[in-house]
Image (tube, rainbow, N blue to C red):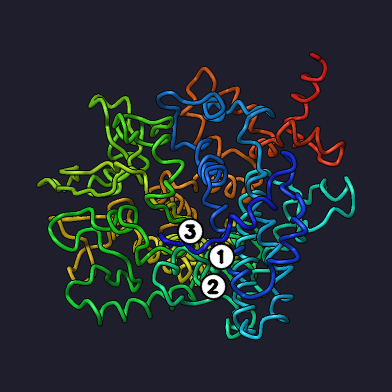
Amino acid sequence: MKNIKSFLLVALVGASFTSCNDFLNLEPLNDIVLENFWTDKSDVESVLLGAYSDLEKSDCVQRMIIWGEVRSDNVLEGNGTGEDIRQICRENLLTTNSFCKYNAFYKVINDANTVLHFAPIVAEKDPNFLPDELLAQEAEAITLRCLCYWYLIRAFHDVPYVTQPSIDDEGGHEKFYVPQSSFDVILDSLIYEMETILDVDGNFKKCRAVTKYPTEDANTARITKASACALLADMYLWRGRDEDYRKCIEVCEEVTAIKKSEYQKLKEKEGKNCTVELINGYPLILDAPSQTPGNSYNEIFGTGQSFEALFELPYNNDVKNPFVGDYYQNNRSQDVGQLKAYDVMGKDLPNSVFDQPSDTRYCQNMKDIKGNGASYAITKYAYDEISLSVTGSGTVSTSGSSIRNQVQADFIIYRYTEVLLFEAEAYIMQAKKIAPAGDDSLSQVAAVNVLKDKAFNLIDAVNRRSIVADGVSKVPNLSAPKTLEIIMSYGANTTIGEVETLLFKERRREFLFEGKRWFDLVRMARRDGDQNRLLGFIKPKHGNSTGSAVEIKLKNPYAMYFPMHRDEVRNSQGVLKQNPAYQDEEVNEKASH
């Protein structure tokens, strides 16, 4: 929530969580705090809100985007790029790179672990701390902890897995150095925890997460049932068992049920002025409810805390977004920041990313700064308002935009369109499971076609919202053709592989520069069992001179992940093991000394 920080008592607990080293943020709580602090439910709330505050600090937010975006085919180094970012852009990852440090996430994890340790104790002391309140706050803490580990394992693969807080000095050196657990072990644990708090197997009847908070801001700035479902759906797709795809669809449908209920209330309240409409049966913000496209951007990324937001980190006059102003379009010079858009996405329209000139996301995401097709600033989040125009041929162009004077853009972690595309991906993977190559059984073909149609309907809904004709969003009551028929002729002969390709293209268009693309490519490669498709996407941006070297590096599957920082490996006194793809660098460096 925008005012969330006014409720924090972080000054009271901040000193007790100061980093003791660069490995894990596990310094014990001060004895005075232990004795005097944990007495009533407000103390639990304060430390819980402190975890949110720690998550939105620079060290976390920068890494969320950099880990998930910079190595992808979306971005290049821009102006004044820092050396560490430059090396990541060039796929030259060193164990000394500062973005290989992850201790900021363990700060949030320790906050969450501390809440989970003390909350039941406080509940015994404070009769006003009701059982349902305890369960809800435990659910928030667990979800925040799972979210942090979710970023960590996708970035590093194997990391230390800690579920107990550091609250005393007992245990000596060993307590502060925890060996890594494997990606799969941690993922299984995260899914189990999220399924438990959501009560997935019980049809969500005993879900512990809050569905709706009393204050509107909190519904996007704090963990809710819908955002917890989004996180779990994401995890299901990475684990990829048959039952995972089924459960992914179930949790996504639960989110849709929540959003449809909210839509009905909003429609009753706002009537004809409501900018949310059902598209293929799913409630989405129209991009052009009137004659001027750009509305969905303005609500989602400009104003923030939109109808579609599930979980976003809030910023305001006091605490500014630590990423956008420096890394995307520079709000001071109105030029390219440290990162810029891969120029092919801009100058070759329509191209492999934006197939349709009437796709408003093209203008919402990037801007040709020089006017020569060579330097495209990233404008997502950097604009606080945008208006677009549509030519007679249907091409969208920018007619007006406003760069943020103060960088207050909320950072979105999950929004509703991602849930729709999660569900589409689950249908596609179900279809691929029952359609082995060369099998033309009529029953199997029929089953695949049902799943294929469901996936396409979801993808089409997300795409349709951003396609305009005559300045008006194409919604069903306008009798417009399915917009994706422009991209490819969808029908009985469309293969499930083509629909999968379409899904990942739509994910790229919808979530450009939001810290999603590299993780998408890694998930694709894990599923393929090789890095060939991943390399096909990223090699062109590296050019002929370095593309071959990048290919050689990324043939090692561990190279898709970041190395552990050298200092953390050394400080662990043998407990932490370096990512196998980067061990030679460690050996060579030791030899040089």
519 relative to 342, above or below: below
Circle 3: is it few (<14), some (14-19), or many (20+) Cα within 10 Å?
Answer: some
Looking at the image, tell me whether mark 3 or mark 2 is earlier in sequence order. Answer: 3
Determine which of the numbered discs, if any, sits on residue 233 in the image: 1
Spatial CA span between label 2 and label 1: 6 Å
Q: How many residues crowd around disc 2 within 10 Å: few (fewer than 14), some, or many (20 or more)?
A: many
Q: Are marks 2 and 1 in contact (CB under 8 Å)?
A: yes
Query: Which residue occupies the foreground of this view, 79 or 183?
Result: 79
- Quadrant location, the N terminus: bottom left
- Residue type indicated by callout 3: Lys
Q: Residue at x 71, y 37 (%)?
A: 564
The picture quadrant where one finds residue 293 is bottom left
Q: CA distance from mark 3 to mark 2?
A: 31 Å
Q: Quadrant of residue 303?
A: bottom left
- Element class at badge 2: helix
Which type of secondary structure does the marked residue at label 3 adopt?
helix
Q: Is residue 200 visible?
A: no
Can residue 231 be seen at all in this image of the molecule? yes
Residue type at tag 1: Ala
Q: Which residue is mark 2?
A: 251
Place of residue 223 in the rendered image (x, y in percent of width and height, measured from the top left): 53, 67
Front of the two marks 3 and 1: 3
Q: Which residue is mark 3?
A: 5
The picture quadrant where one finds residue 144 is bottom right
Between discs 3 and 1, the one toward the N terminus: 3
